[in-house]
Amino acid sequence: MSNNPSPDRASDSDRSASSAAFSPLYQQIKSLLLQSLDRGEWKPGEAIPSELELAARFQVSQGTVRKAIDELAAENLLLRRQGKGTFVATHHEAKVRFRFLRLTPDDGKSSISSSKVLECRRVKAPADIAALLELRTGDTVVNMRRLLSFDQTPTILDDIWLPGAVFKGLTAESLARYRGPLYGLFESEFGVSMVRADEKIRAVSATPDQADTLQIASGSPLLQVERVSYTYGDRPMEVRRGLYVTERFFYKNSLN
């Protein structure tokens, strides 16, 4: 068994040799699998090769490949299906669709969700948004405002910013025609998979305009959630600032 997974060594030349030397072998395999996902070798929803095939490709043991895949599955980047194999996670999948949304009904019952895009335009990036997206101030971004309702009750008002160069062709008209999850659209139409996110949370009061949209009283308490979502390689692809009505919901998170 080789300690250097040779078939993909050339494509991994940008990594530091010294850091790779001190990485456990399964972590090196995990890194190579992430590079293949980033390149689009396996699309969202598609099966990846078997553990046996990947072990032969990287010249390592099947157990090493399994440990790398286990970590990617724990991070919701891959999905194991009993008797069928391992698949690239997709936001079209029910298990993955709402994994970044931590709002949970007080009664624990499932709610029927619906979304409405209120606005979508291309604008110059404000300085704070440009910094979060690693763009230059004034670069073009797509800015959309969306209202998410549960059981027909307005619950989340989102302001979303996306890099304009990546999301060419995203318009209010195309969003109006689309019926699936927003991150699913990003995957299928723009080749962008959101794989992780960082969030900041604070309590705020609803302005008159926000209150009117959310159908609540002006000054009502809201939970403001700022999310920066990343694709492979820790590249920021979305800034989302959501205002959450929590009269019937709470924010749930698991800490390890």
Image (cartoon, rainbow, N blue to C red):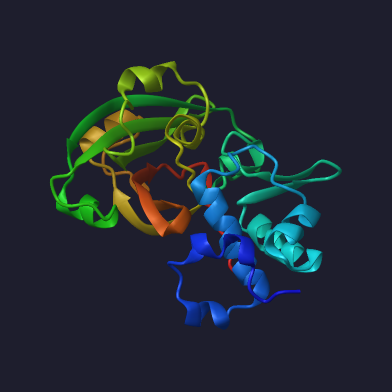
Residue 256 at least partly seen:
no
In the rendered image, the vertical position of residue 177 relative to residue 222, given as above or below: above
Image coordinates of residue 72 in percent, x first then y, are: 64, 58
Q: Would you place residue 68 above or below residue 212 in this image?
A: below
Residue reaching furthest to the right: 83
Left or right of 89: which side holds 38? Answer: left
Looking at the image, which is closer to me, 76 or 115? Answer: 76
Task: Tell me where residue 97 appears, x and y as whole percent.
Answer: 57, 39
Residue 220 placement (x, y as % from top left): 32, 44
In the displayed structure, 27 sits above or below 219; it is below
Quarter of the image that includes the C terminus: bottom right
Q: Is residue 125 left or right of residue 188?
A: left
- The N terminus: image quadrant: bottom right
Q: Nearer the viewer, residue 154 or 44?
A: 44
From where the camera sits, is residue 84 visible? yes
Compare residues 102 and 138 and report the one nearer the observer.
138
Q: Residue furthest left?
A: 138
Pick the residue in front: 205 or 133: 133
Q: Quadrant of residue 128?
A: bottom left
Residue at 58% x, 60% y: name it: 8
Q: Quadrant of residue 61?
A: bottom right
Residue at 50% x, 59% y: name it: 11
Q: How far across and how far down the image is residue 142, in percent?
A: 27, 35
Number of numbered discs on residues: 0
